[in-house]
Amino acid sequence: MTDLSSFPVTKKWPAKNPDIIQLYSLPTPNGVKVSIALEELGLAYEAHRIEFGAEGVKSPEFVSLNPNGRIPALIDPNGPDGKPIGLFESGAILVYLAEKTGKLLPADVAGRYETLCWVMFQMGGIGPMFGQFGHFFKYAADKVANNSYPMERYRDESKRLLSVLEERLKTRKWLMGEDYTIADIATFPWVRGADVFYGGREALDYASFPAVMAWLERCLARPASAKGLEIPA
């Protein structure tokens, strides 16, 4: 049995089976990226629900795993050289899992880097911009009731990013063509989330992006997506 005692997070959220991957997360657009990938890859894992706030993501135990105090984070007891490794940042975790298994990332160097470009497009663009749109559109609407600029700024940038996806997907089944990759897994939860979490479908004019909407439906239809979107319960 693997000894994970060097990771303080396992004291607050004990591992029932320390020989499998330990996932610390919530079913948010960022969190479900990792659970969906784990389901796609068929890797055994144990999910721990980490709430927001002082007892969850801001607790010393969790911060010891992710200094930034954000989900998701992960411990792989069978990391490089067979030693346990702790990871944070959803994009980094997706790359790690893909490279660990040799799946969801093209084997050829050019394809690999093109896929990583689209992962970084999500990490640096879609995630932050959609998140800010949602904040001002839904959660802080009362605070900016007399100033529409913040919501409009992030709405318009989110729509611009959707137009980039639209052009990419007009002639492709997946972001990388015929192969489903971590680029799709990184991105589609945010496109779904802007509607499901923020109610932004009409504000972002989803009807104007038919290729994106068709791609989103294909992503959601995958069995691993259906399961991963609900983890941790």
Image (cartoon, grey):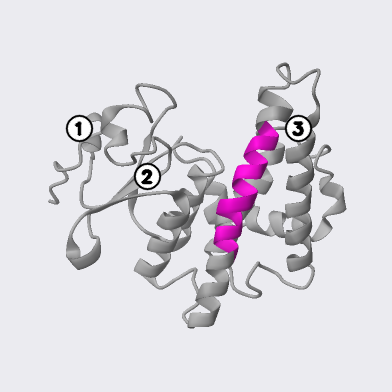
Query: Which residue lies at the image location 55% right of the left edge and 52% below the top edge?
Result: 123
Q: Secondary structure at mark 3?
A: helix
Q: Determine which residue is flagged by label 2.
A: 73
Residue 35 placement (x, y as % from top left): 45, 49
| Mark 2 and mark 3 residues within 8 Å of each other at the beta carbon | no
Q: Residues within 10 Å of mark 1 (few under 14, many from 20)?
A: few
Type of the residue with mark 3: Met
Instruction: Specify which label sits upstream in the sequence, 1 or 3.
Output: 1
Q: Is residue 144 above or below residue 76?
A: above
Q: In the rendered structure, does residue 100 fall within the stretch colored magenta?
A: no
Q: Which residues are magenta?
A: 118-134
The amino acid type, in three-letter code, at marker 2 is Ala
Quadrant hosting residue 143: top right
Circle 1 SS class? helix
Q: Residue at x 48, y 60 (%)?
A: 40
* Residue 131 part of the magenta-drawn span: yes
Q: Residue at x 51, y 45 (%)?
A: 32
Q: Which numbered disc covers residue 11? A: 1
Amino acid of disc 1: Lys
Q: Nearer the viewer, mark 2 or mark 3?
A: 3
Residue at x-position 69% and y-position 40%: 194
Q: Is residue 36 left or right of residue 176?
A: left
Count the labels in the image: 3
Residue 83 picture quarter: bottom left
Alpha carbon separation for disc pair 1 and 3: 41 Å
Q: Count neighbours of disc 3 (C-alpha within 10 A) and say few if under 14, some if 14 to 19, many if 20 or more.
A: many
Gap between marks 2 and 1 measured at Cα: 15 Å
Q: Secondary structure at mark 2?
A: strand
Residue 69 is situated, as x and y percent measured from the top left of the image, at 39, 35
Of callouts 2 and 1, the N-terminal one: 1
Cα–Cα gap, marks 2 and 3: 30 Å
